Amino acid sequence: MTFPAATASPTATLVGSGAILLWSLLALFTAASGAVPPFQLAAMTFALGGLVGCATWILRPKGVRALAQPWRVWALGIGGLFGYHALYFAALRLAPPAEAGLLNYLWPLLIVLLSARLPGEGGLRPGHLTGALLGLSGVAALFLGRGDLRFEAAALPGYAASLAAAFVWAAYSVLSRRVGAVPTDAVAGFCLGTAALSLACHLALERTVWPQGAAEWAAVAALGLGPVGAAFYLWDVGVKRGDIRLLGIASYAAPVLSTLILVAAGYAAATPALGLACALIVLGALVAARAGQRRAL
């Protein structure tokens, strides 16, 4: 097992940031995809995302060799992608969406905390922790602006599932850095494995509902090409070779950017809380970036 170099690549960090931008489109495309059940939608979009990765092997035949990985790597890849989505879907079924969403967005903070134990990362810096907490405060402000948050005992299983999803995604992201020698081409296999497990869950738990009309099919295709496709390849590059802590903190921008896009598309209204959330998340990212520059010096 090979560990990446301690020095983070600015280019890889920028590539990883592309995943955050794509994830900000997730809510818009999901809303436009109609009434397709969650596991069915995951099966369709992860299959498309995996096949897109495989299609690149036509020009790069050696890319298929990336699938020859130890079972631990496959467990990490599929466990991270499928495990996160399965737990989050369960959380949305068992708890109110706002509360589940807020708890789930602990994963960027967890990335900052867990990455402190990575070789060559130099321990936990106050600036990174401060930036992550500012980002979390921004997301909390955003959710509070949408309405009252009411944590109820009856929804405890849903809250637990949401927290578990946050830990799974943070662990997947941090542990991916520890297997930095695994080519990003392997993500195509992880996506196809996730699609197969999602299909099994769909057949066992849901009723099939196909998209209606060209617009809904286009939204499903956009999901598979972007937020549930290319984003995972970009994130893999970022967490393996970029500044993983800065990427974790920058991830708090995803729900804010998502809300801004929904406002622009007419699915949501602008609120003062949205402006506050933007300010807190930008401030958190600046604090974290400054901490990263000091470490580089």
Image (cartoon, rainbow, N blue to C red):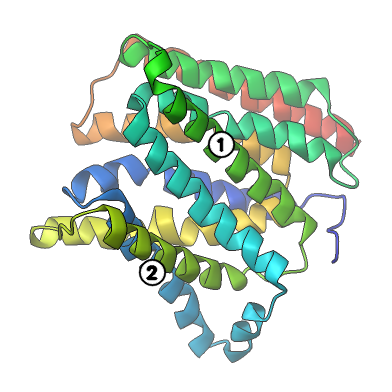
Q: Is residue 7 left or right of residue 70?
A: right
Q: Secondary structure at mark 2?
A: helix
Residue 283: where, in percent of width, then height? 61, 19
| Along the viewing direction, whichever of 162 and 274 lies nearer the viewer | 162
Residue 262: where, in percent of width, then height? 27, 33
Label 2 Cα neighbours within 10 Å, binned few <14 / some 14-19 / many ≥20: many
Q: Residue at x 48, y 16 (%)?
A: 140
Q: Is residue 125 above or below residue 80?
A: above
In the image, what residue type sits under mark 2?
Ala
Q: Residue at x 68, y 22 (%)?
A: 131
The outermost residue toward the left is: 213
Q: Is residue 175 left or right of residue 33?
A: right
Give the mark nearer the N terminus: 1 vs 2: 2
- Residue 258 in view of the camera: no
Q: Residue at x 20, y 47 (%)?
A: 32
Residue under pointer 2: 47
Q: CA distance from mark 1 to mark 2?
A: 24 Å
Q: Quadrant of the C terminus?
A: top right
Q: Name the quadrant containing residue 151.
A: top left
Q: Name the quadrant containing residue 130.
A: top right
| Along the viewing direction, whichever of 35 and 230 lies nearer the viewer | 35
Q: Is residue 22 above or below residue 290?
A: below
Q: Is residue 216 above or below residue 282?
A: below
Q: Are marks 1 and 2 in contact (CB under 8 Å)?
A: no
Q: Secondary structure at mark 1?
A: helix
Q: Name the quadrant containing residue 24.
A: top left
Q: Quadrant of the N terminus?
A: bottom right
- Which label is found at residue 164? 1
